[in-house]
Amino acid sequence: MYVVSRLRQGACITRPILHSHSFSRLAQQHKPFVSKLYSTNQSPPSAKVPPSSSKKSHLLKVVIGSVIVGTGYALYERSKAAKAPPIGNPQTSPEDFLLKEEVPELKVARRFVNPSDQTGLKLTLFQYQPCPFCCKTRALLDYYGLSYDVIEVNSVTRTQVKWSDYKKVPILVAETPSGQKMKLTDSTMIISAMASFLTDKSQSLLEVVSCFPRINYRDHDGKEKMDVMNKYFLMYKDAPTHRTKEDIVNERKWRRWVDDELVHKLSPNVYRTPSEALQAFYWFEEMGDWKEHFATWERYLVIYFGALVMWIIGKRLKSRHHLKDDVRTSLYDDCNHWAKQVKKRGGRFMGGDKPNLADLGVYGVLSAIEGCDAFTDLMKYSDIRPWFEATKEAIQSHEGQYLLQGR
Ligand SMILES: N[C@@H](CCC(=O)N[C@@H](CS)C(=O)NCC(=O)O)C(=O)O
């Protein structure tokens, strides 16, 4: 069954994967439909067919058996999780932040070169083009005018990230002129780390990256999870930031809002109807150059099956994240709220006369749906357009590249 990878959080709008658990949940949800398929109003069975009471008892046995096996398996999984060793923080010294894996030579999908980037960093972004977290990361790299290569990850086979223990995208591999290689994972961490590195020239990239250790933990179901500590924080040593504390705290608050609120409004809007879902997948195909990276059968499977399943899942995400009946209204509400707060701060951007990291985050996730009907409606019926266009202009003209000086 093809479903999105970020089903739980409902954020990623594009990765179709085989996911039997979700399939069974969907089947559960559509039980009335399934049972209708198997129910019958036909006349009583003929003499050759066993009496219905024996049929019933057979069915009962099957049901009881399945319940026992299912419960046993669930208890086994739970006790296994409880007995598993405690999980902690695997990175304790700066060396732990150096890349251990061997990254294979892979086909570069796109290469961005900015002659003003004299950092000497070799940056490689592993991504899915329409993933909102990847779009957020690219917004940052483009705004600062960093040169980077893009490796388009096949969202079905994910062969391009086989080398990595972290399987999500984006992943940014950074190699310094002295040959130190690091793997930066999680869009928010990548953004905080790169922004800190460019602002505070006294720190090496390794020093900055070491401020963002991974934390491994188990969720309520005993499932292993990973997060990055401090990911919303900028790490400055002694560099003057020329910013007030209130400004920094406000930026952080809105960056969290992007991840916790805004991103959840995307999927239910993009996949609101079957035709919108299909249109979105066609746009993803174009944007991610799938013709170049996917086999034809794989492309059509992702497009048609993906659109169908995402339409169904969009409905679940709508209720999980408490969107209004008319899901567009929830998207407009968030964007109007954002536009109002920007206005209240008195500048063109949340960051004043220049975009800050919250501006880049909001722009990044909205740019992920740029070719979809939801985006067209958003520009038409909400107040966000002037801000969106100004931010796009700032990013595309690499307005933040002045920070590259001295790096
Ligand atoms: N918190 C992460 C989320 C990244 C994420 O969920 N990426 C999705 C694509 S949009 C993914 O790679 N999912 C793969 C998977 O869950 O297996 C970030 O901000 O980078």
Image (cartoon, helix red, strand yellow):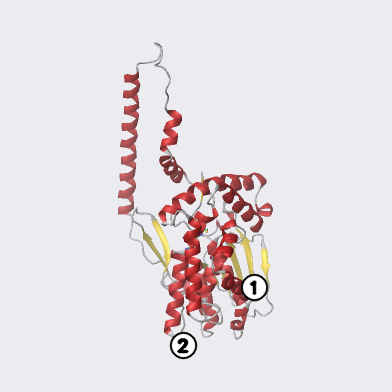
Give the class, few, some or many, for how many residues have Cα within 10 Å of label 2's Cα (few <14, many ≥20). few
The correct choice, above or below, for 58 with respect to 406 in the image is above
In this rendering, the count of numbered labels is 2
Label 1 SS: helix
Tell me where residue 48 appears, x and y as whole percent.
Answer: 41, 11
Label 2 SS: loop
Residue 119 in sight: no
User: In the displayed structure, does residue 141 sit left or right of residue 222?
Assistant: right
Give the class, few, some or many, for how many residues have Cα within 10 Å of label 1's Cα (few <14, many ≥20). few
Q: Quadrant of residue 305?
A: top right
| Nearer to us in this view, 405 or 83 | 405
Residue 324 in sight: yes
Which amino acid type is shown beneath numbered disc 2?
Answer: Asp
| Nearer to us in this view, 316 or 192 | 316
Q: Disc 2 versus disc 1: distance between alpha carbons?
A: 31 Å
Tell me where residue 261 appears, x and y as whole percent.
Answer: 44, 64
Give the labeled residue for mark 1: 396
Give the labeled residue for mark 2: 238
Measuring 34% from the left and 39% from the top, which residue is drawn there?
70
| Nearer to us in this view, 373 or 185 | 373
Instruction: From the image, state whether disc 2 or disc 1 is nearer to you.
Output: 1
Which amino acid type is shown beneath numbered disc 1?
Answer: Gln
Q: Quadrant of residue 176?
A: bottom right
Among the two numbered marks 2 and 1 on one chain, the one whose residue lies closer to the N terminus: 2
